[in-house]
Amino acid sequence: MELETIFNSSEKSKKRFEVEEGNRPWDIFLVIGNGRYTLSFPDLDETYTVGPFEASYIPKNTTFTRRILEPIDFHQFVFQCHVPNEAYKNLTRGTLGVPEAQIQAFLASADKLSEIADSSDFVSHMIERLITESYIFSKQGGKCARGLSVEVSETIRYMTDHLSEKLDMGVLAARVYLSHAGLIGKFKKELDTTPVEYLIMLRLRKAKQLLLEGELPIGVIAERCGYANAYYFTNAFRHYAGMSPTAFRKQYR
């Protein structure tokens, strides 16, 4: 997926939007900390109420109307997607189905953006993170996320909850009553990656968060992200981010 950030902004205790209605050539995410507002799509006869720890999505070239009901704290991300992936293609207008815990974690990271001198790469990462989590967690009619089977969704949830542990793919497959090859096949079909590659992405995404949000030593971060030592972690991180963990922390903080 190739993203271009148009701009991002944040507001506290906002009582009225500068732009309450219109039609924009960009995609818009609005992530709420506190407060409440309504988002309507008049041409489609749809209205959503977006509250605390929820996120909304306005697709490009879609007419919208929005009104603040209670003063809101929010982060706004305006972007274009030039090379869409399956997660982007499955975004749906209105309220995103991302759980409150994920939104709280997202907001904790977003609050740090103002402290970063050149945050363009980090903002793109935040947008991609929200797109991915919307794809994973969105539900419709009580079913699992669109495009994801129960087996893949449950495996991702387990990985996310046990990032610091040594995870055996065969054991993960058995948890959802699949063979190792069967689990790989489902990940390849539904996410175009393998379980191991997805686990590495989750671990290194967590590493970025820990590097930016605290002063933990590299060795401790390596351990919390499931790496045996700082050497292996540093090599994996450099391959993923294009720089060492220490350089990443220095540049983005």
Image (cartoon, rainbow, N blue to C red):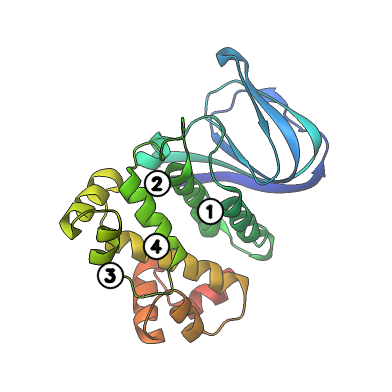
Front position among marks 4 and 1: 4
Q: Is residue 199 left or right of residue 182?
A: right
Which sits earlier in the primary sequence, circle 3 or circle 1? 1
* Secondary element at tag 2: strand
In space, the residues marked 4 and 1 are separated at their CA atoms by 20 Å
Asked if the residue at tag 4 contacts the one at tag 2, i.e. Cβ–Cβ closer than 8 Å, the answer is no
Q: Amino acid at mark 1?
A: Met
Which sits earlier in the primary sequence, circle 2 or circle 4? 2
Circle 1 residues within 10 Å: few <14, some 14–19, many ≥20: some
Q: Say if residue 253 shows up in the picture.
A: no
Which sits earlier in the primary sequence, circle 2 or circle 1? 2
Q: Toward which corner of the image does residue 106 lie, by quadrant?
A: bottom right
Q: Position of residue 95 (x, y in %)?
A: 58, 34
Indicate whether 24 appears above or below 121.
Answer: above
* Secondary element at tag 4: helix
Q: Who's the residue at 55% across and 15% down the image?
A: 44
Q: What residue does disc 3 label?
A: 168
In space, the residues marked 2 and 3 are separated at their CA atoms by 32 Å
Q: What residue does disc 4 label?
A: 159
Which sits earlier in the primary sequence, circle 4 or circle 1? 1
The C terminus appears in which quarter of the rendering?
A: bottom right
Q: Position of residue 4 (x, y in %)?
A: 48, 45
Circle 3 residues within 10 Å: few <14, some 14–19, many ≥20: few
6 and 106: which one is in front? 106
* Secondary element at tag 3: loop
Q: Who's the residue at 39% across and 69% down the image?
A: 242
Numbered circle sitting on residue 2:
2
Q: What residue does disc 1 label?
A: 126
159 and 40: which one is in front? 159
